[in-house]
Image (tube, rainbow, N blue to C red):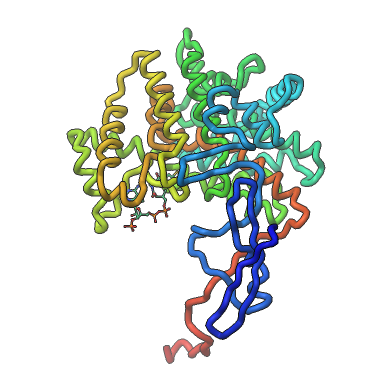
Amino acid sequence: MTERTAKLTLDDGQTIDLPVLEGTEHEKAVDVSSLRKSTGYITYDDGFVNTGCCTSTITYIDGENGILRHRGYPIEDLAESCTFTEAAYLLIYGELPTRPEARAFTDRLSEHSDIHEDMKHFFTGYPSGAHPMSIMSAMVTSLSTFHPTVRDEDWTFDETAARLIAKVRTIAAFSYRKASGKPYIYPRADLNYASNFLNMMFSGDGEDYEINPVLVRALTRVLILHADHEQNCSTSAVRLVGSSRANLYASIGAGISALSGPLHGGAAQGVVEMLLKIQADGNDVDKYVAMAKDKDDPFRLMGFGHRVYKNYDPRAKIIKGACDQVFDDLQINDPLLDIAKKLEKVALEDEYFVERSLYPNVDFYSGILYRSMGIPVNMFTVIFAIGRLPGWIAHWRESSQDPEWKIWRPRQIYNGAVARKIVPMDER
Ligand code: ACO
């Protein structure tokens, strides 16, 4: 809170002074929470395009300048120097771990990697074509039936958070194995987070499957890049559900469901499907750019545009670099990468995209990278969810610890019929 206030004058003559808040990076906000009480007015902001719903110490984004920092550390540095579990620890607990803290955290993850044997039966109940994101949200919510939790004890939180981070990876790999009709591969305590995931996904496929360190490094990077992004749709869902004092599993289940939409985490799948379509259509990039610009056509360039970034998404830059590195190191040639680069070039030079500040977002190149790892398209959003989990947990914890905790309950402007009487059915 600052000493400053903003004055609001309504056309009925009422004037009110509203407090001004300022963040550590000098972001400013007018606190309108007292407005209704003193004037009867609410604020209206369709889709929350300009509404701050909390204060937070986790992530800072400057969308105009393409800046993303977690707990003060630039995303570029975290992606370059950290493991995924270190980044997860940072987000949840506020500081990078010391060596003993990192070891204790990793041990805790190893301890919780297995899922209860009874849960394995759940997988068999889903139809073979079931989307792994639907399976994942149901399985995560089901975890609370096996591990009932007390909400506000710190030690319970630590266990629950570790359990989720460890088990979500196992659930994801099992849902892939189930969908492909392959036997489950159990987690191994001797492997790091990303290696363990790749091993559970693919090690049963051939006698000589070897975990490739180039892919492990790339997957680690992608997971870190997805780890948090402040008040996006899914994180807001987690905070909203958690605000009713719902437990962590239920809140994360809501986050996974929110992430599954094609305008949010589903975009990586959408990008690859779009690129495949362009390829099948003779690589006609210009045609698809024209379709994206046509207001009578619902088609949008997937992986382009962002509510917050009006500059190149810093995560997209890193993933593009990671893609080039993996393709070089492993001598991979995927024509979809060439189409993506051409599409990016055409769009970035086009007036429509320039005027609207539409740049590639995190999902534009991530799908192509997943393909190079052998990860099928319907698992892309699942990987996003594994990466985003520490962020969701960090936000749930932060909101739980807020001394002014209250249930989230937005208001609306009612635009429907005014009061009327029920007419008997025969007279309608
Ligand atoms: N292709 C073509 N036009 C676009 C695109 C796009 N991908 N994105 C935005 N626009 C246009 C809109 O039509 C609108 O044009 P107008 O001003 O002439 O009406 C203008 O740009 C602003 O777009 P909005 O939809 O108002 O922007 P909003 O902030 O609501 O949406 C969103 C952001 C949902 C990401 C949007 O850009 C989009 O649909 N992108 C494609 C899907 C995608 O990649 N989603 C992943 C987002 S990142 C993430 O969740 C991890």
From the top left corner, tell me how far across and down residue 35 is, in percent: 64, 72
State whether residue 215 appears in this view. yes
In the image, 275 versus 391, the foreground residue is 391
* 68 lies above or below 197: below
Is 399 on the left or on the right of 300, as rendered?
right
Quadrant hosting residue 320: top left
Q: Where is residue 152 in the image (x, y as percent from the top left)?
A: 79, 46
At 62% from the left edge and 30% from the top edge, which residue is drawn? 87
Q: Determine whether 63 is above or below 12 in the image.
A: above
Residue 125 is at least partly visible in this image: no
242 sits left or right of 218 in the view: right
Q: Left or right: where does residue 404 sit relative to residue 354?
A: right
**Which of the image's four quarters has the C terminus?**
bottom left
Q: In which quarter of the image is the N terminus?
A: bottom right
Q: Position of residue 26 (x, y in %)?
A: 60, 50
Residue placed furthest toward the top: 208
Q: Measured from the top left, where is residue 156 in percent x and y?
A: 79, 38
Residue at left 22%, top 34%?
280
